[in-house]
Each structure stands twice: as C-alpha cells, then as structure tokens.
Image: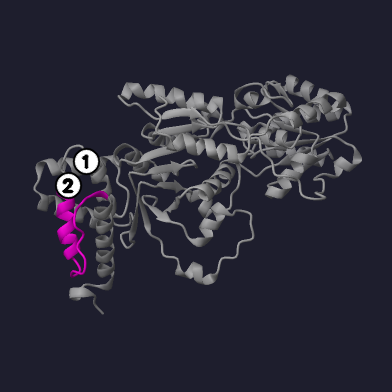
Amino acid sequence: MTGPHGAAPEAAVLLTALEQRLSAAAAAATDLEVPVDVEPGHVAARLLPALLDACRPHERTDLRWLLLTVVHAAFPTEAEVRDLGRRLELAPTEAVESWLLGESLRRGGSGRRDLHATVVSGGTVVDVDFCARYETHTGIQRVVRETVPRWARDHELTLTAWVDTYDAMRSLAPREDARVLRHGQDVDIPLESELAYRPRLVVPWRSLVVLPDVPSTGTCDVLSALGRFSGNRVGMIGYDMIPITSAEQRPDVDAVASAQYLTVVKHAHRVAGISESATAEFAGFVRTLAAQGLRGPVVHEVVLTEDAPPPAVDEPAAADATASGRPVVLALGTREPHKNQRTLLHAAERLWFEGLDFEVRLVGGRGWSDTTLQPAIERLLADGRRLADVGRVSEDQLWRELRSADLVAFLSLHEGYGLPVAEALACGTPVLTASFGSQAEIARGGGCVTVDPRDDDAVTAALRELLTDRDRLARLAAEAEARPRRTWDDYATELWDFYTTTEDLH
C-alpha cells in the first residue's frame, strides 16, 4: 500500500506533519501567504525557501529558532541556531534547504516528526512534565500543584509535558492534565477521552514560558537556547542551589545536573526565589555572569506560603500518644543526609536514657541515601524505644500528623525554604528548627525555637526544654496561631504578577 505519489505511508505521515508545522509557523511569525489545497509536498516546497529567506537578517535568531523547531519537530540547541545562521550567511537558499532537510532525517530518534504542532503566539506556556507524569507529591510538586491550578482558574494557559526524547514540548493527555490540576481528587476520565488523545507539539512564539518545576537535565540544552534565541521570555522558580553550594550533602550526580540547570538560569528572564536565602543564592550566581558578558535574569523574592487546609470534621488524631498524654515529636522530610534526622534521633536517645517519656514519629520517604539514618532507626526500634517509623503518607494524613504533634522538629542543614516549618506553624504546632538560612527567616515570626542543627548538645538541650516545659510549649503554640497567614492564593498571584509585569526590576 502506498501514499501520495507512491510514497510509503510513513513518509506521507511525516510529510503531512512537516507541512502543517511549517504552515503554523508561517502563519504565526510572518506575513507569508500559506498555501492551501495543493498537492502534498507543494506546501513545503513553497514555504521552506520563503521562511529561510525571512531568517537571513542577522537579528532574526527568533525566526531561525522557530524554523528549526518546526522542521526537526524538536527544540534546537544553541549550536544548531548558530549553525543555521552561519550557513544562511554563506550559502544560497536551495543549499541551506537541502542541508536542513537532510539534518532532519539524520537526527534519527530525536523529536517527534510525526506530530502536528500548535504554535502558541503571545500566550503563557507552563511546563508541568514531572507532575503530569508522576504521582509524587513532595515539596516542589506541591508548589506546582497548588500554584498552576490557581493560574488556570484565572488566566489562559497552555500546559505542557515533554516528548519522551525530552527535546520538544507536547500537549497533555487527559490523565496528565488531572494529575496537575486536580491532584488527589477522584477524577473519572472516560476511556474514549483517553483513546482519542493524540499529542501535539507545543511551540511557544513570543510567549511567556514558565518552568515552575526544576527542568529535567535532558531539557537544559534546548531550554538554554529557547531563553537565548527564541524571543520567548522564560520565568523560573529558584528553589535552592544546594547541589552546588552544599555539594557534600548531595550525590555527585546532583552537582552535574545542577550545573546544567544553571545554563537555563543564565538565559532566563525572571527567577522568583522562594525565600531570602534562595534569592540571595540565585542573585549571587547572576552577578557572576558579568564575567561572561551576560546580564542574566531578574531575581526577586516571592516567598512561599504558611497555609494549611481546615481540619476535617471530627478529624482523628494521628498518634495514640496524644490520648496517653505523652508528648509527640514529629520529624518530617525525605530521608537523606542534609535533612539531618539522625541528629534528632541522637538527641532523642540521650533524653530517653535520662528517663523522659515521649514519642518521635518519622514521616517521609527514602531519598538518595539513608545509610546513616536507617541503622539508627532499626536499633532504636529493637531497643523498644518510642519511635514510630511512619514512612511516606497521604496528604490527609500529613495534616493529621502536623495537627496532632506537640512539636515538629525540622533540623535541615540547608533548605531553600523549609515548607514543613511553615506548614506546621500554619497548623498551630511549635517548631524546633535551624538557626540560619530560610528556616531562621520563617522562625522570626514566632512559634519556633532555633538551634544550630550541627551541635548535638544544643539540639538535645532545646529538645529537653520543649519536652519538659509545657508552659513554654503552650506560649509557642499561641505564637504560631497568631502568625499572619500567607496563602497559596497570595503566592500564586504575586508569582504571576512578577512574571507578567513589564517593569524592569534590575
């Protein structure tokens, strides 16, 4: 079986998709007349040379980026954009056309040349790939899933994931859309809706591209080129630079990935730091870019929230210890070295030896390494200590744990913000936390005791005081209740305003 002019069906599909993408680009970015109702192949034969000619002016790097994207069905790298520009300077149009089509064929498995494209002109494109693909719902994913649905409620957005080769954005499947906008809800997605889904490439043109998650390392080269050449504006959230500035607390691979991520930051337009500390880290990086002749993005603090949902009617307590009157210390966080739960367990063990009666509840899943923490957990459980190894919990149980605890201990060695601290305070629960960085920033508003988390004696003394002085604990709880609440609505609105304002904040 053959397609038009004897071509194999696969070739016909690729040609049809190419011509649709070229037509969409020409309609969005030029005043070229887009041919209609012509034989297959004629659209490409007319549009591709005309688009190449339109790309010849030196300043049209944005149109070169767009043309490479629609021909290859993949975002180009910086080197590819430069290469096209150099060829346009030295070679006739027909030679560049042959080279460009040949390059598309030689790219093999990259991109999705079988897909049609939607060119989003003057809009807002939001990359939600990780939250769309996975159910994981820890710190960054919670920020995305609290913020993006509020934007979608109030503004027109195009949500995207990435094709599996991570070099082009695509539309979301119905289930992916639900994971982002209605996470945790019982969503019934009709089978026919799933079966009818056909991905389309999403190509931003003179739009705002928002990266609320940390980009996958596979996307960094093309996102850097997008920020530098495409004419789109790129907005990012600056969570932290822990893999660079505290590299000893992370696996080596994270430092490499973070360095790749910073190539995107270089060519972004706005970065919203989630705390004073995170903002200072990113602003410091941007100041170094002058040595490369780069201006870098505007970096501005948009502080995260202190928000909590209202308790459910007759919400049960999370721990039996609450009923017994025994104090409950809740330790939240992924189990990895910089979260520093091992220091808390050492302090707890010292106090158990002193005869204090209290329970520690560990909530959080395994991270990249728990080789220091897990043996201590196993030994304390074998000794019969009042330690509950709760593990990863649902959203509802997380809030029950926060409200039921007498005290939350969050003694991280480095945090971009410290969301567990803020959420505990929003529940009216006092917090023992670090005396520096973003955790100390949150603590300034009351309800907290701060301590150097690297000092075993200081941590033990602070924990002892909080477990034995119920009046002190009650005063801290009252301070926590009295703190002004910064909601997710506040955060989403301020973040949107920062990305979309035309004011130059440099």
Query: Residue 317: x percent and y percent?
Result: 82, 45
* Residue closer to the observer: 241 or 129: 129
Q: Rate crowding at label 1 as few (under 14), some (14 to 19) or many (20 or more) other CA atoms within 10 Å.
A: some
The residue lying at 18 percent from left, 66 percent from top is 41
Residue that lies at the very extreme toward the bottom in this rendered image: 1
State the colouring used for the structure image.
Answer: one colour
Residue 376 % position (x, y): 73, 36
Residue position marked by numbered label 2 in the rendering: 54
Left or right of 117 on screen, residue 174: right
Q: Residues within 10 Å of mark 2 (few under 14, many from 20)?
A: some
Which residues make up the magenta segment?
A: 29-53
- Numbered label attached to residue 60: 1
Q: Is residue 265 visible?
A: yes
Q: Is residue 99 visible?
A: no
Q: Quadrant of residue 352?
A: top right
Residue type, mark 1 in image: Arg
Is residue 50 found inside the magenta-colored segment of the image? yes
Residue 248 screen position, x and y as percent: 54, 28
**262 in relation to 163, above or below:** above
Residue 18's place in the image compared with 374, above or below, is: below
**Vertical comparison of 347 with 197: above or below:** above
Q: Give the CA distance from mark 1 to mark 2.
A: 8 Å
Is residue 368 found left or right of 118 in the rendered image? right
**Residue located 88% across and 33% down the image:** 357
Task: Tell which of 177 and 485 is nearer to you.
Answer: 485
Amino acid type at circle 2 is: Ala
